[in-house]
Structures are given as structure tokens and as C-alpha cells.
Image (spheres, helix red, strand yellow):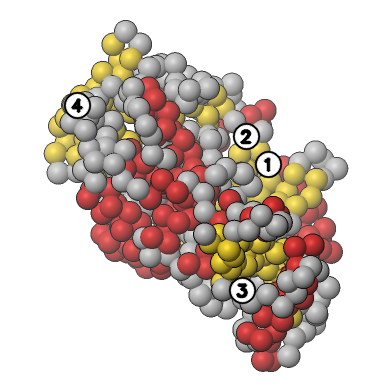
Amino acid sequence: MVSIVKIRLDGIKCPAGYSTQDFKQAVREAWVKTAESRGNENREFQTVRVLKKSLDARKKPSLFYVFTVLVSWDEPEEPFLPESLLRIDRESRVDENFLVDQPGDSARTSVRPVIAGCGPAGLFAALTLARNGYRPLLIERGKAVEDRIKDIHAFWEKGILLPESNVQFGEGGAGTFSDGKLTTGIKDPSCRAVLETFVDAGAPEEILTMAKPHIGTDLLRNIIKTIRERIESLGGTVLFETKLTGIHIVDGRIQSIEVTRAEDPHPDLIRTDTLILAIGHSARDTIRMLSAKGVEMQAKPFSMGVRIEHFQKAVNLSQYGRQPEEIENILPAAEYKLACHLPNGRDVYTFCMCPGGQVIASASGVEQVVTNGMSMHARGLENANSAVLVNVDPSDYDSDSPLAGIDFQEKWEREAFLAGGASYKAPAQYVGDFLKKTPDAIPKRVIPTYTPGVAWTDLASCLPSFVTQSLRMALPLFDQKLAGFASTGAVMTAIESRSSSPVRILRNSAGMARIEGLYPCGEGAGYAGGIMSASVDGIACARSCMKGMGGGSIIV
């Protein structure tokens, strides 16, 4: 009888630029320090698997990678074998059944569940339903990712905006054109299942071990398409350019939905008693329709501000310290995360930092300007960018309507459009001019990456006064934490207004709105903030749907 012994070793340190031999020696030293190694100090491991890897730059310029590993070997089972040596690491793989598919059951799918929205929440809701044999129908108002890319580049290069095919609408949602960050503050077992699904669809395996995993928009495009094809192979159907325009309710329950297709302006009815709303935070017309139909919702806080760009090399220097060239060339592009609470009661923080990336045009509405950040997997461009955001509370809105936050967003996005010259150029200003600081002796100014271009202006013309006031207070404070953050040559581009939804569509503990069969889901419903949390919420909503539809054994 043979038993596989697995031991987890934490806090293994290797200097930046470490060799394979350095790593093996560090693992050996960590093993010798454990209680389990007594009498087994020279144990030969059959496998050493990295569970987690992070870069520690707290004592710069001395940089260290910190590992958590799982060592294992075969051991004959004998009565004297210490119980501690039989520990199995349960964190290395969670939700094993998530990757196991169950054939469709025609009895349970006579009325197919519908998911509106093909962003992370909608995709993972549809995938979960498909894996359990429910043959979901996934509708998306935008285009398939391969067609969507062409429309987005036409907007970036020529300022031609298509309201139904842009950075916000289309296969993969807004996250497809981002840094592809997979970091999250939630602690949910489904996070592992999401990561493994991405790897199964073509993402690098390193995302399973990185402390701050990311994919990059260049890789995400193909990964999203692969997940869609997986849904279809399991009996699901995906309809693009199909917009949710109405819901029909009988006796407090969803009976059917109304959709409009791009090629036919006349609405079609789809019979269903289960609808997952994964519509995204920019589907303002859909949210207004739902409100008019009596779907309960409330205004919620969100944030507003700008995108700030620095030279990536300057960020690297500040975060890592000066490094030898051979080390500098192998280090990842440095990241940062900053926050402060101001005397005026406002919170200011950086969000969705994109190392080696670019600022992109993200509008979905006519005569509106919206910015966001994007990076490729390599993060190899000259500039780093990040949102710098100020909290906006419902008390700042112009009315008590649940939709007042949407009105507030649209007001300032239109102001940004006008400040940019009414041509989809974005208003921009150098930090030195914004703070009215004396220019550096030898000014080296960052070139903005936003396309179709910027218009140099006073950002106070397109931001609420409390936002500009808070930014002016916060930038010098951030400069104390990250040298050069308030450099006169850094550039700010406005307006960043879509970091989260200003509306929450209410749902109960079963994940359902007051209307039976209606499941609000993801960022647009106010329950997530990023690719990972939206994906996990999609899985949770699908799970709730299956319980509501009388599902038995559920694969999640």
C-alpha cells in the first residue's frame, strides 16, 4: 500500500534573478525547518509544485520572490507514519467538478433559461448552466469579438462610434478591452474554478500561481471566443446583435422577453421563465426599461475621476529602486495601488492600474467621452496608466431617483465631449498645470496614448468641483507614497466614469428580484467589480437559477 504525501511550504524566498539551483536550495532549506522533516532531512521530493508566487519589493533595491510550494512523494503506509505527513493540500484545486460536463436533459430544458449579456458574468452563468445540461440561450446586443474589434479600432482611429459595438458592448464585455486583471478581494472557492476555466481556454498557466494574475487584452480576445464555443458545444446558443428590449410579467413571474435584432427592427418574443440580467454597467437604456417595468432598484455610490499616465520606467524606479541592467530587464512592469481619505470627507484611490499600457476611448453613448485603461499581456508599452477616482455618493446626485446616478454620469460625459472639442477627443491636462506647479527644470512630458487624440484644456470644465478639489489634495499625498506621481510632466485624461454601476438592481437571498425568475447579476446589477468577481457572481446566479428550476445534482 502506497500513500502520496503532500506538504505545503510557505515563505520561500529567492532573490530577483534567481537560478533553478537557487530555487531548489531555498525549498530544501524551508523543508529542513519544518517539524515533518525530522529524520527526513535528505528526503528526495518527486514533485515540487508552485502554488503561489509574488514579488516582494518592500526592502528595495533588494528584491525577492516569495513562493508557496507543494512538495510530494510516495510513501509506504506504515503504522508509525506521522499523521502530519498525510496532509493533503486542499487549496491546490477547488471545484473539481466545475470542469466536468453533464449531458443535456430535454425534460429540464423545455423552456430554456436566458442570459442577457455576454460579459464575464453572463459567460460564466451560461457556461455553468450548459455544463449542467440546461441548454442556455445567451443574448448579446453587441457583436462577436472578432467583428467587435474592427468597430472599436474604427472608433479609436477615426472617431466613428457605433452605439451597439464598442468597448462597453459586445462579446466579453468591457473587460475584454482592459488589462485583464484577475485580482479580487472576494474569498470564494469558485475563484479557482474561474482561473482554471481561463487556462483551459488558452490563458497562461502562470495565472494559477501569480499573486496578481492578469491575462491582457490580446490574449483575452481568443479566450473569450473559446469559452463561447464551449457553451455552444454543450447545447447552449449564443445570439449576437440581439438586444433585450422588454420583459413580460404574469402574476409576478417572468413569462417571456422581447428582443430586437440588428437585421430586423421588429421585436421578437422569446418564451422563458428564467432570465439572468448580466447586462453590464453601461446598458443604461435596458436599466431604464427595467425600471419602467417595475423592477426594483436603488441608487448606489460609484466613483469619478481621470486617467493618469507616467513613464513606466519612472514607476519601476520608484517601486523597485535602481537595479542592475540584467535584473531590470527581467523584472515585470511595476504596479501600484494608492488610496487616501481627505479632510473634506472624500476618498481618493487609484483603480485598474495598467502597467505598460494605454488609455483608451470607451464611450458607448453618442456625444459622450469616457476613458479606460488597457494593457497587452506583455505590458511592454512606454507608459503606465491608472484611474485616479473620487467617491461619488447618491447625495451628490441631482435627484432622489434610483436612476439619478446614471443621469449624473451622462451629464459629465457630455461635458467631457464638449471640452474635447465635440469630436470624441478627450480633454487632457498636465499635472503641473492642473496643480499650477512650477515646471521641472528639464521637463520631460508624457505623451498621452488616448486615441483619437486629446484636447488640452482645464479639466475643471468637465469634472464636478468636488472631484477636482479632491484630486488637487490627493496628488501630492500620492507623490509622498510613490515618488514622481505628481510630476509636472504626468498627464491626466478625462473622464473616467464607468468604474462601477451607479445602480443596484435589488435581489433577495435566493439571488432573485421580486419578480420571480429574474436574476440580477454582475457589475451592471451592482454586485461585482472586475472580471473575477463578475465571473464568480455569474456562477452563483446560475446556481440559484438551477435551484429555482428544480435542478438536482448541480455541477458548479
**Rendered view: 365 above or below 8:** above
On the picture, is 343 further left or further right than 325?
right
Q: Which amino acid type is marked by label 2?
A: Pro
Mark 1 vs 2: CB contact within 8 A: yes
On the picture, is 228 further left or further right than 367?
left
Look at mark 4 in the image and give the residue it sits on: 107
Displayed quadrant of residue 152: bottom left
At 44% from the left edge and 21% from the top edge, which residue is drawn? 513
Q: Which amino acid type is marked by label 3?
A: Phe
Q: Earlier in the sequence, mark 3 or mark 1?
A: 3
Displayed quadrant of residue 89: bottom right
Look at mark 1 in the image and give the residue it sits on: 391
Look at mark 3 in the image and give the residue it sits on: 45
The CA distance from mark 3 to mark 1 is 51 Å
The number of callouts visible is 4
Q: Which amino acid type is marked by label 4?
A: Ala
Secondary structure beneath label 4 = loop
Which of the two residues, 84 or 173, is positioned nearer the viewer here? 84
